[in-house]
Image (cartoon, rainbow, N blue to C red):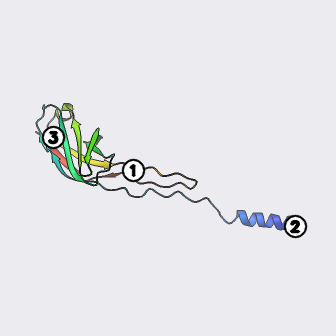
Amino acid sequence: MKTISVLLLTIVGLGCGYSSPKAMAPQPGVMPAVSQLVPNTANSGDPQFTLTVNGSNFATNAAINWNGTKQTTTRVTGSQLTATIPATAIATPGTVPVTVTNPGTPGSGGIYGSGGTASATSNTMNFTVN
């Protein structure tokens, strides 16, 4: 009888659908905002230049994206970033989209995991190459 009781409890226990806790999904990151590009134009064929991006909510490891490509970025303050734009990036006339991305943060791990934060990319401002 004891064997049947233990077997019955084991079957019931396994059939309850227990599963380990799920890791939390990443939370939204802090959204940066771009308000001004300095300069906001250049002439094709000009030499490299330093682009200053003014705005708000720039993380310490925020990155300026020039035409979708991450640039080596220096954070001046939480509202100003700079990057050197090479001459090859302004060799052809056109409009270049500029954004800022605050990278996400990884989860803290632990036995149940944690979601951290997702990366967040600002609004687009256009830079004109004449």
Seen from the viewer's position, the closer of residues 127 and 78 is 78
State the separation of the CA atoms marked 1 and 3.
31 Å
Q: Earlier in the sequence, mark 1 or mark 2?
A: 2
Local crowd size for mark 1, using a 10 Å CA cut-off: few (<14), some (14–19), many (≥20): some
Labels 3 & 2 near each other (Cβ < 8 A): no
Looking at the image, residue 109 sits to the left or right of residue 72; the answer is right
Q: Kindly indicate the quadrant of the structure image that contains residue 47.
A: top left
The residue under label 3 is 94
In which quadrant will I find the C terminus?
top left
Q: Residue at x 31, y 48 (%)?
A: 101
Looking at the image, residue 22 sits to the left or right of residue 32; the answer is right
The residue under label 1 is 104
Q: Position of residue 64 (x, y in %)?
A: 27, 44
Looking at the image, residue 91 sits to the left or right of residue 110; the answer is left
Labels 1 & 2 near each other (Cβ < 8 A): no
Q: What's under tag 1, amino acid-wise?
A: Gly
Local crowd size for mark 2, using a 10 Å CA cut-off: few (<14), some (14–19), many (≥20): few
**Secondary element at image label 1:** loop
Q: What's under tag 3, amino acid-wise?
A: Gly
Label ID, residue 2: 2
Looking at the image, residue 40 sits to the left or right of residue 121; the answer is left
In which quadrant will I find the N terminus?
bottom right
